[in-house]
């Protein structure tokens, strides 16, 4: 047994003819005064398995009960890895306290491809900058994604419907092999449990069958250290009510002893990340001017733009942004203390597009995302965005006339008129959010200013007088990082080359 790594017990027992998914087997693991009881699962051919993720080193005793029984003890040796990821404030950390910054990509149907294509994808990922992959448990039916998978998650009943009480062991064994391979590369798996793009009937099985599926899935997978739960991709389009979604959320949280990150992805209606079991916001949106709104709405929790459109050249508008635009969106997000997820959709006659199936990367953005990741991971903490200068003015709407007049009385006349016009507008919140500079900071130690598509000649930055700073100019597209000044404090003007995609980084000395 090793800290932060999956420990597995495999015990032979009676061969089951049915009801495989909810076998009566569990184990109690005791370490000091703490006992954690976890359910096991039937793995086929009379084999029962129980998996456990030890979070502390030391001596453990374990006792298996149910259809099979056994007991023993293990010495859990200290970790050689950082452990599972969890949230901390508006960011993420590994179990050992090391910061984790998600720079993800999307390969929805990775697990449902031929072995050769999976191997090619894993080779690509081993050299790519991504440390998180969004992927589905169920196969996907959509454009460029019409192949039949080698296996399905369950066997079928005589009437042709899926029998969730009879999992397909070949499917789950192969699926777990992919999780192991990604874990070996340090890649978190943002596992999508449900989605609407279905021609096989997985999206319409009914709530009771959904819960049997989730029971078996969590028994098998919860002890993987590199796992996140994404309840759905575009939850509004599936055949489920919001009450069923809330039940699913509670079920997954209750059946995960380790508190893996949990979110739910939207198409139109952003999931309420303030719900207690939801650890972070997973958002689909192309309008990043609304970042301030989501940061404010989900105050205290991380925000990830898990779908901002894809670098590619296919016909749909969501699959045809340039590599430069993808990189901009990453920098827009990180400047606000938010994260972004990559995807790639370049047309191919064989229908092997990265966002759906994997393969190899063709775009210009991945190496620039690697540059972005290198810069962000070098900083001494979690960036916090600087809100639109108009956003505080929205508070004027909640004041009575006397309070408002007092707040405005000391302002110049033109600014006073501007703010009064703003709060009188029915679009005040949207406009205030959109007037954003892509500026972030870490206390007074770091200031990042990303100028996106503005080819400005200089940047006047206001720094504290009581510290000195090194000023660096970053070309986020050409991937250059140049120190332009040291020992700077107070107001300083940074010359810039009148090019797009430039950033200024000031770090306390």
Image: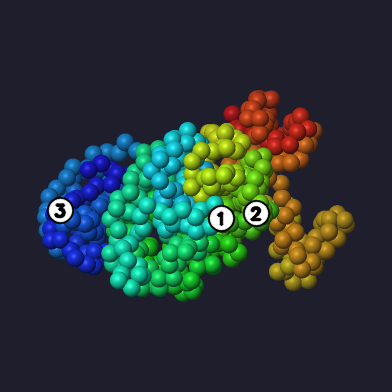
Q: Nearer the viewer, residue 392 or 26?
A: 26
Instruction: Answer with mark 2 or mark 1, whichever residue precedes in sequence.
Output: 1
Distance of mark 2 from mark 1, alpha carbons? 10 Å
Give the residue at x 72% y 61%.
430
Assign the N terminus to one quadrant of the image.
top left
The residue mark sitting in front, 1 or 3, is: 1
Q: How is the image coloured?
A: rainbow
- Determine whether, in the image, residue 353 is placed left or right of residue 51: right
**Where is residue 299, by image quadrant?**
bottom right
Label 3: which residue?
11
Q: Nearer the viewer, residue 472 or 326?
A: 326
Q: Dot 2: within a 10 Å radius of its alpha carbon, few (fewer than 14), some, or many (20 or more) residues? A: few
Q: Dot 3: within a 10 Å radius of its alpha carbon, few (fewer than 14), some, or many (20 or more) residues? A: some
Distance of mark 1 from mark 3, alpha carbons? 44 Å
Distance of mark 3 from mark 2, alpha carbons? 51 Å
Instruction: Answer with mark 3 or mark 2, whichever residue precedes in sequence.
Output: 3
Secondary structure state at the residue bearing disc 1:
loop
Question: Against 250, is 493 above or below?
Answer: above
Residue 432 at x, y percent in the picture = 73, 58
Label 1: which residue?
143
Residue 149 at x, y percent in the picture = 41, 53
Label 2: which residue?
316
- Determine whether, in the image, residue 69 is placed left or right of residue 361: left
Asked if labels 2 and 3 touch by Cβ distance under 8 angstroms, the answer is no
The residue mark sitting in front, 2 or 1, is: 1
Give the residue at x 65% y 25%.
483
Q: Dot 1: within a 10 Å radius of its alpha carbon, few (fewer than 14), some, or many (20 or more) residues? A: few
Give the residue at x 75% y 33%.
499
């Amino acid at each position: 047994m090793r800290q932060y790594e999956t420990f597995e017990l495999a015990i032979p027992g009676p061969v089951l003819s049915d009801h495989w998914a909810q076998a009566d087997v569990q184990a109690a693991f005791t370490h000091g005064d703490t006992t954690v009881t976890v359910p096991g699962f039937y793995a086929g051919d009379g084999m029962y398995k129980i998996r456990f993720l030890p979070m502390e080193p030391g001596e453990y005793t374990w006792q298996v009960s149910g259809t099979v029984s056994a007991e023993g003890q293990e010495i859990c040796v200290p970790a050689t890895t950082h452990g599972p990821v969890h949230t901390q404030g508006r960011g993420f950390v590994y179990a050992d306290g090391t910061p984790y910054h998600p720079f993800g990509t999307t390969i929805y149907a990775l697990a449902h491809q031929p072995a050769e294509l999976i191997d090619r994808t894993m080779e690509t990922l081993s050299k790519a900058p991504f440390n998180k992959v969004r992927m589905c448990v169920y196969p996907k039916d959509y454009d460029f994604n019409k192949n039949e998978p080698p296996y399905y998650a369950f066997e079928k009943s005589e009437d042709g419907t899926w029998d969730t009480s009879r999992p397909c062991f070949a499917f789950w064994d192969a699926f777990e092999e992919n999780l192991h391979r990604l874990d070996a590369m340090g890649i978190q798996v943002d596992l999508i449990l449900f989605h609407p793009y279905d021609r096989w009937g997985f999206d319409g099985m009914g709530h009771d069958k959904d819960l049997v599926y989730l029971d078996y899935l969590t028994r098998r997978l919860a002890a993987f250290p590199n796992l996140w739960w994404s309840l759905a991709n575009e939850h509004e389009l599936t055949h489920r009510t919001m009450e069923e979604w809330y039940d699913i959320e509670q079920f997954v949280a209750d059946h995960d002893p380790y508190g893996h990150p949990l979110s739910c992805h939207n198409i139109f209606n952003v999931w309420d990340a303030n719900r207690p079991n939801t650890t972070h916001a997973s958002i689909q949106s192309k309008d990043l001017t609304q970042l301030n709104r989501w940061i404010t709405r989900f105050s205290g929790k991380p925000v990830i733009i898990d779908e901002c459109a894809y670098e590619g050249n296919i016909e749909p508008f969501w699959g045809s942004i340039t590599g430069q635009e993808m990189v901009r969106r990453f920098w827009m997000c990180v400047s606000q203390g938010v994260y972004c997820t990559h995807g790639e959709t370049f047309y191919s006659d064989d229908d092997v597009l990265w966002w759906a199936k994997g393969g190899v990367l063709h775009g210009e953005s991945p190496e620039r995302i690697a540059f972005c990741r290198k810069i962000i991971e070098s900083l001494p903490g979690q960036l916090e965005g600087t809100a639109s200068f108009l956003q505080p003015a929205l508070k004027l709407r909640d004041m009575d006339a006397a309070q408002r007049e007092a707040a405005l009385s000391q302002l110049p006349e033109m600014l006073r008129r501007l703010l009064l016009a703003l709060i009188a507008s029915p679009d005040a919140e949207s406009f205030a959010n959109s007037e954003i500079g892509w500026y972030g900071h870490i206390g007074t130690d770091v200031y990042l200013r990303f100028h996106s598509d503005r080819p400005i000649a200089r940047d006047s930055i206001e720094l504290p007088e009581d510290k000195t700073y090194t000023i660096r100019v970053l070309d986020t597209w050409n991937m250059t990082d140049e120190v332009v000044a040291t020992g700077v404090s107070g107001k300083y003007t940074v010359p810039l080359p009148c090019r797009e995609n430039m950033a200024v980084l000031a770090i306390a000395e």
